[in-house]
Amino acid sequence: MRLSRAFLPTLKETPAEAQIASHRLMLRAGMVRQTSAGIYAWLPLGWRVLQRVEQIVREEQDAAGAQEILMPTIQTADLWRQSGRYDAYGPEMLRIRDRHEREMLFGPTNEEMVTDIFRTYAKSYRDLPRNLYHIQWKFRDEIRPRFGVMRGREFLMKDAYSFDLDHAGAVRSYRQMFVAYLRTFARMGLKAIPMQADTGPIGGNLSHEFLILAETGESQVFLHRDLLDFDVLSQSVDYDGDLSPIVDFWTSRYAATDEKHDEAAWAAIPEAERVSARGIEIGHIFHFGTKYSAPMGLQVSGPDGKMVVPEMGSYGIGVSRLVGAIIEANHDETGIRWPEAVAPFKVAVLNLKVGDAATNAMAETLYRAFDPDAVYDDRDDRAGVKFADADLMGYPWQAIIGPRGAAAGKVELKRRATGERVELSLEDAVARIK
Ligand code: ATP
Ligand code: MG
Ligand code: MG
Ligand code: MG
């Protein structure tokens, strides 16, 4: 993308309403625009990152055996009356009436709808197990939307729903999602820790929240220090095999949010091994048995011909919240430092003298080598502006080309994460970035 033609509306001033770094930086970098309280438009840079995050989530869900669908945002109140949640959900639910006075709502989650879809088709034990997920906008009328996309009212969530014949199967499905979550967040460069969690309004008895540590997090968390050094991605995973060793490994150390915190277990951990910190919830997995399948009449015939009520679980990831969370974990005073896996563009080519023939030629060549994963700063602007914008927007690499370097056939490469700089030939620069 050529910056001379791009819609990247950066802000010079720090917006007063933004209380935390990620919100400030997303506004300054022109990633999002708040259109009303807790509701955001995603501008080109932000939209690219959101899609990259979404794609990692999708790949890991698919790898774990979940199948993607797309359910609507608008639901009928009838379904929620069947589960008994229509009245229980309270003011966080945005309730709507259509022209025929039918009660509708903007979905805050989809347990009822997916159970309705599944009960229509699933007839026998052969239709199980299944795991269906979608990545769709949700609405929760949060009392205090804040921190930008971290606590929005409209937000993008991946929610998966598993259906199993019995408890052992449900635990297997739960473990598949547990492991998929570890991999998903690790691929984004995040250290997400699974922690024992409350099941809240969804109910049930087996639940983990995945959190990253951050001073601005809204949850208080307690964990064993070892968890911060556990590795995820070096291990290959067989989702059809026994996943209990991985889950047991991760649950072998204490980790809990304040709702589940157990002072006695905590006191038993040597003080030097305890970490008590703030955390951001980026994912949450629940097993809730027949909480929805039973009242909604989902039944299949079992192997012996008797009817069985499937056990279910649900598994959420805050896709749009993750964009903010990744910035919280990867920034400095000058701007964002995107991990490569989610960066909007891999490299920014900074032309320091637009119009100089040798500089233009070299910059064009480098830009074309990485397009569409490159931005080309071909604006007629001062070098200082280009450096500041590239630092703010946080591209992993900056390729800086000026007339002196171009004459000598040299590019200056800067790694955003470390600030490290090297001068290389064009060819070596391309190889280094790749
Ligand atoms: P929170 O405790 O932050 O209110 P939650 O426990 O209500 O979140 P879940 O019902 O577990 O949320 O939804 C799954 C995921 O959706 C959460 O782990 C979080 O990442 C994301 N999420 C929930 N509410 C919001 C929101 N208002 N804005 C952005 N993401 C959200
Ligand atoms: Mg909530
Ligand atoms: Mg929560
Ligand atoms: Mg939750």
Image (cartoon, rainbow, N blue to C red):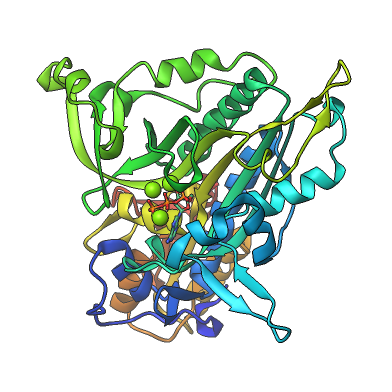
Up the image or down, 99 lies above or below 359; here it is below
What residue is rendered at 25% in x and 77% in y?
Answer: 17
Q: Is residue 234 left or right of residue 117?
A: left
Q: Write down the quadrant of residue 335 in the picture.
A: bottom left
Q: Is residue 120 left or right of residue 13?
A: right
Residue situated in front as seen by the camera: 83 or 157:
83
Quarter holding the N terminus? bottom right
Up the image or down, 203 lies above or below 101; here it is above
Give percent across and percent down for residue 179: 54, 28
Residue situated in front as seen by the camera: 171 or 345:
171
Residue situated in front as seen by the camera: 68 or 30:
68
Give percent across and percent down for residue 215: 21, 50
Give percent across and percent down for residue 125: 83, 26
Residue 183: in sight, yes or no? Answer: yes
What residue is rendered at 37% in x and 85% in y?
Answer: 381
Residue 407: in sight, yes or no? Answer: no
Residue situated in front as seen by the camera: 100 or 376:
100
Number of disc labels: 0
Give percent across and percent down for residue 247: 48, 20
Q: Is residue 147 left or right of residue 83?
A: left
What residue is rendered at 76% in x and 40% in y?
Answer: 298
Up the image or down, 411 lies above or below 389; here it is above
Up the image or down, 114 lies above or below 251; here it is below
